[in-house]
């Protein structure tokens, strides 16, 4: 994915299993996980917030994970410019948990 003309091409990896929750990772370029940019310590992107949008088995990747990732990348590019996350977000105070299913961007 390439969110803007001036951004790098991001190589992504989507992991999911039947009846499981998907997880999106950025393979390249390397991005250090941080709650400030909504990446869990495991390296997967924080794309949706389960209290507002719990993952449903009938969701399609083309309607959820792919556009949510594109949106996340735009906000990441803006973060690099301005140093603040401009997308919708929820607190990452519980960053220590391994659960990684909060829609935030």
Image (spheres, rainbow, N blue to C red):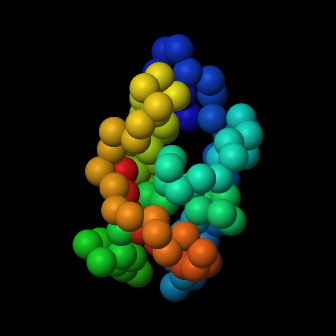
Q: Nearer the viewer, residue 30 or 41?
A: 41
Q: Quadrant of the N terminus?
A: top right
Going 67% across and 58% down the picture, which residue do you hit?
A: 43
Camera sees residue 61: no
Going 53% across and 14% down the picture, which residue do you hit?
A: 6
Q: Image quarter for residue 10?
A: top right
Q: Is residue 54 left or right of residue 44?
A: left
Q: Nearer the viewer, residue 79 or 7?
A: 79
Q: Position of residue 80 (x, y in %)?
A: 52, 28
Camera sees residue 9: yes
Q: Position of residue 50 (x, y in %)?
A: 36, 75
Q: Nearer the viewer, residue 92 or 103?
A: 92
Going 33% across and 44% down the picture, which residue do you hit?
A: 87
Q: Is residue 51 left or right of residue 41?
A: left
Q: Is residue 80 left or right of residue 27?
A: left
Q: Residue furthest top?
A: 6
Q: Is residue 87 left or right of residue 1?
A: left
Q: Position of residue 83 (x, y in %)?
A: 47, 31
Q: Residue furthest bottom?
A: 19
Up-down relation of residue 95 to residue 79 (above or below): below
């Amino acid at each position: 994915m390439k969110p803007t003309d001036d951004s790098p091409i991001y190589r992504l990896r989507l992991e999911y299993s039947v009846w499981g929750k998907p997880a999106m990772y950025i393979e390249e370029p390397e991005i250090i996980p941080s709650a400030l940019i909504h990446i869990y310590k495991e390296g997967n992107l924080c794309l949706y917030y389960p209290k507002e949008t719990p993952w449903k088995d009938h969701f399609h990747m083309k309607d959820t994970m792919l556009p949510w990732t594109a949106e996340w990348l735009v906000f990441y590019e803006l973060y690099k410019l301005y140093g603040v996350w401009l997308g919708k977000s929820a607190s990452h105070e519980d960053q220590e948990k391994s659960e990684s299913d909060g829609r935030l961007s």
